Image (cartoon, rainbow, N blue to C red):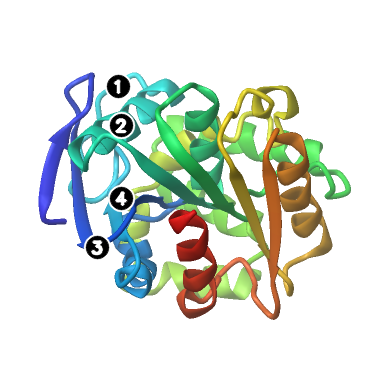
């Protein structure tokens, strides 16, 4: 991250600006830093000014307790001010839930786009799964068991047990444990894990909700429902894509939306 700004509560935020054109701030999901979205920023840099940043508690950004979702909305307000005062927001996964909340809160957003916010409304037993994860995650983190917290998250995403065991032995595991406390932040952003329909009606700007055509049906249905819940929503499905979407496929769709 090349530049720094400061949020309302004094938290330092590291960010990087790439490209030229209308501004879009890219918001990463759980277990991610701004660097995770750098390839997407590069892909749209010929059409947009793309801003990536480390959310609080990750990378080079600071962290000021206690955590509240409103503080992350204030982070986006500080970033928006730092890059010109008005921007489109784009969020991946739980980062998309943060984007929708920021737009609903009245942040001066031009437009809002999200990719596969994992609302569990259309997953059988989804509400119960989310409640169990929340309880186990907060217990693990309160007891300092960061590795167990990471395992819980990886299991929630559907990663096979043998792959989780392999991840624990990999060089990247230490980095994953380092950002494990931020899993509680994403869990808080997601609320009860279900789509906040009433809250989404407060969004007054155009919203693009995108899903991968190869993602599970429940995920695609949740993304479609986001577009229906907001006053001005559009749904797009990217053929052959999963939750790990390819920047070369998503980039042109996002850039077109940002350009308006």
| Disc on the earlier residue, 2 or 1 | 1
| Disc on the earlier residue, 3 or 1 | 3
Q: Quickly name the residue at label 4.
A: 178
Residue at 18% x, 48% y: name it.
60
Q: Secondary structure at mark 4?
A: helix
Frontmost of labels 2 and 1 is: 2
Asked whether disc 4 touches disc 1, contact meaning CB atoms under 8 Å apart, the reply is no
Quadrant where the N terminus sits is bottom left
Asked whether disc 3 touches disc 1, contact meaning CB atoms under 8 Å apart, the reply is no
Frontmost of labels 3 and 2 is: 3
Residue at 60% x, 75% y: name it.
162
Query: On the picture, is 40 further left or further right than 201?
Result: left
Q: Quickly name the residue at label 3.
A: 20
Q: CA distance from mark 3 to mark 4?
A: 33 Å
> Compared with residue 259, is residue 244 higher up or lower down, i.e. above or below?
below
Q: Secondary structure at mark 2?
A: helix
Asked whether disc 3 touches disc 2, contact meaning CB atoms under 8 Å apart, the reply is no
């Amino acid at each position: 991250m090349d530049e720094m700004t400061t949020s309302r509560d004094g938290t330092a935020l590291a960010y990087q600006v790439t490209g030229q054109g209308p501004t879009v701030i890219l918001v990463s999901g759980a277990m991610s830093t701004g660097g995770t979205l750098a390839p997407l920023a590069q892909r749209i840099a010929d059409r947009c000014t793309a801003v990536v940043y480390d959310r609080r508690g990750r990378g080079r950004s600071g962290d000021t307790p206690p955590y509240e979702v409103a503080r992350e909305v204030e982070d986006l307000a500080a970033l928006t001010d730092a890059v010109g005062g008005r921007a489109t927001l784009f969020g991946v996964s739980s980062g998309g839930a943060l984007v929708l909340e920021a737009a609903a809160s009245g942040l001066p957003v031009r437009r809002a786009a999200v990719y596969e916010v994992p609302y569990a409304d259309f997953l059988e037993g989804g509400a119960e799964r989310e409640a169990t994860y929340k309880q186990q995650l907060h217990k693990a983190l309160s007891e300092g068991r960061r590795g167990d917290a990471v395992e819980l998250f990886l299991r929630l995403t559907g990663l096979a047990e043998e792959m989780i065991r392999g991840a624990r032995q990999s060089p990247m595991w230490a980095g994953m444990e380092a950002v494990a406390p931020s899993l509680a932040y994403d869990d808080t952003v997601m609320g009860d894990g279900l789509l906040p329909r009433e809250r989404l009606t407060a969004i007054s700007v155009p919203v693009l909700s995108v899903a991968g055509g190869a993602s599970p049906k429940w995920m695609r249905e949740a993304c479609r429902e986001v577009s229906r819940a907001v006053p001005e929503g559009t749904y797009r499905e990217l053929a052959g894509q999963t939750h790990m979407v390819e920047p070369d496929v998503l980039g042109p769709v996002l850039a077109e939306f940002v350009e308006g």
